[in-house]
Image: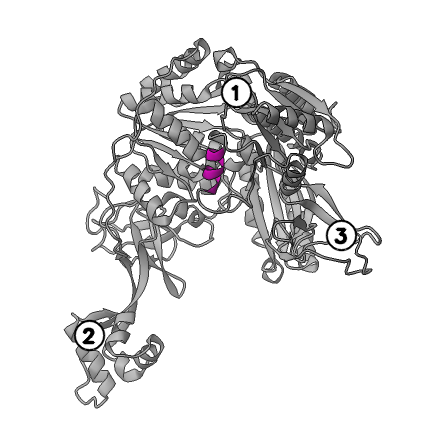
Amino acid sequence: MTGKTASDPIFAQVISPRAVRGLFTYSVPQTMASELEIGKRVVAPFGPKKIIGLVAGFSEQVDIKTRQITQIIDDEPVVSSDQIKLALWVADYYAAPPGDVIPLIMPRNDAKLVTVVELAGERPPSSRSKIANRIYETLRHKGGERKLHLLSADLEMTQAELKKILSGKLVKSFTRIRQAGRIVTQRNVETKEPAARVKVEPVRLTDDQRKAVASVAPDIEKGRFSTHLIYGVTGSGKTEVYAELARLALNKGKSVLVLTPEIALCDIITSRFEKRLGLRVTVLHSGMKPKERHMNWDRVRTGQSRLVVGARSAVFAPMPNLGLVIIDEEHDASYKQEDSPRYHGRDTAIKRCSMEGVPVVLGSATPSMESYHNALTGKYGLVELTHRTDGREMPEVEIVEPDSKKTVGQEMAEALRSRLEAKEQSLLFINKRGAARFVQCDRCGHVFECRNCTLSLVLHSSTKKLNCHTCGYSERAPDKCPQCGSGELFAGGAGTQKVEKEISELFPGARIARMDRDTTSRRSSSAAILEAVENRSVDVLVGTQMVTKGHDYPGITLVGVISADNMLHMPDFRAAERTFQQITQAAGRAGRGGGGRGLVVVQTLSGGHYSVSEAARHDFASFYKQEAQLRKLAGYPPFVRLSRIRIEASSVKNGQRFIECAEPIISRITSNTPGLTHLGPVEAVVFKVRNRYRWRILLKADRSGIMSAGVKKIVSELDTIPAPVRRKARVVVDVDPMETM
């Protein structure tokens, strides 16, 4: 705030930690003007209360009446101006309240509001009140002020009792109550970066890998923004390319950020980078304990750590002198946040790199339709790794029909038997957990459904319960039908538990491990399972899609995809893309060792569908060509921009009343905006979730700018719907959604 005189009016733009759109303007007292900076936290009035806000900018003139900031909390900025710019872009692009982004750019909770009692006048000389005298004397001896909770302890009374006394006329004549921000002192933690834990293991790059490095290296050398897509088949050594590129950036004194789609992959990537580079890697993800995360965050912020591996939220890491960002498995839907702010980690990383002039590398064996389209049209650089390292063959893929009576069909069972006899490992992938997807009465047809959602309950045999995987509702597994009393109940639709049970019955001596959300809920549990696989103490690994990502175990020579139809026949425009990706990613775990060619067995009734047949041929280009033709005709990404507006209400009546008001607004705006169209409103595929009813509207636009302007206008005008109707519904905006159901 240099260049201002004491008489200049100063106004601060403050991000409020509330779910309110936009920034709030406050006047800055002249006594604070020289101290206030962007990135500092302040205490300011917000309605009848006070808040701790973050200063995002300044202005010299405003045309509104403002209130004053009452306190500056920090001596130094806790957030950089670059982080604030990125946060405001996220809030603007994804139509989110700026306050929702604060926890992402500032993962610390060391500033709190406390109630302070202070002397504001002389004690009345005629006072005979013993408690009034005690309050006055206590405050005087404590320097004229005292935190409410400490003063109540001094006086040996509860805070409620003290508040009642402080509200009396006599005590109010010489005291004042205010709210103040304070920094909570935390235990000092050693943040000095330790030495590397492992010896460097040099790797000789293949010709394809050297070409990939050479295509990105000039942008690292010159420090310029660019986006490169590395499309490499599974086992082609993309991680080695990442490590060499990171080495180039680190040697220039730059810092490097590596993003992974899953927390479980952070440890794997960290280990590989440490072995290749001999540097201690700092890990950042939401699954860490708060103190550990804050310690690592500070280590990164102060430049002590220059190599960071993290999940989605690490894109906001406060990395000074950033020189390279790498996004592994860029296609993965886990990069998209489900709650506000509904940002995409990949796209946010690309925006950050464009702001800071940094190259970004996207890597995948199954690129997203959007990224591959951008590469083909020249927006991204395209690097292809078409062969596995060491000349290993891609696995053979067999497409077989499922058994009507068994989850694991005969062909897959025989393949498993041969692997067990050869002392080789197998992986079975099914994208559903539990023992059965639904339980139904054979006599009357009753299906056990969640009380809170329009979803069938999933049977979990280990706990003998029926669970809802959406809201968490649970009830005891039934013995008989509540409608007709019949004990003839059918458990249909396989999950990981059922597959595990069948394998244990088929092969009693096999060592089986299951990896899904049920078995990995505890910290480090996924790492323990994967370590057992690596140590060859597991013969068969059964799991959901988390077992198909980034794992490289030479002992796995067989991969079984239990039911590709579960993925393909979802009512969503990305169903074919996800099917191709998951079959290909699962298949990529087979035959990565030094032995013979791996085998993949895919059980499906849809073997003729191009997503399955092209995955069997390992032909991404052919899949993309066919899928792109359909997307272009139907008007879906990557050829249009897409947003979803979801309307939620506690009752069907309240939701329908809101829609009756909202539909004319949306129709008028889309009709008057060239290049913007909408579909709906219609009921969501899952109509009821957590006792709230949901409707959806899809917006399509020719360009990002049209979509952004349209979303803002629609959201703004929906806020004008009469309060009695508006307050009984909730509007949820998802820009660039990963699914439309």
293 relative to 282, above or below: below
Which badge, 2 or 1, is on the more N-terminal residue? 2
Q: Is residue 280 left or right of residue 394?
A: left
Residue 39 in the magenta stretch? The answer is no
Residue 592 — which label?
A: 1
Question: Does the image show residue 324?
Answer: no
Question: Which image quarter holds the C terminus?
Answer: top right
Residue 447 — which label?
A: 3
Question: What kind of secondary structure does the magenta stretch mostly adopt?
Answer: helix
Task: Check disc 2 and report its element: helix, strand or loop.
Answer: helix
Which badge, 3 or 1, is on the more N-terminal residue? 3
Along the line of sight, which residue is nearer the eye, 206 or 53?
206
- Give residue 273's position: percent from left, percent from top: 37, 26
- Give residue 540's position: percent from left, percent from top: 58, 32
**Which stretch appears magenta?**
525-532
Q: State the separation of the CA atoms marked 2 and 3.
A: 67 Å
Which badge, 2 or 3, is on the more N-terminal residue? 2
Residue 450's image quarter? Answer: bottom right
Q: Is residue 444 left or right of residue 429?
A: right
Mark 1, other Cα within 10 Å: few <14 / some 14–19 / many ≥20: many
> What residue would you read off at disc 2?
139
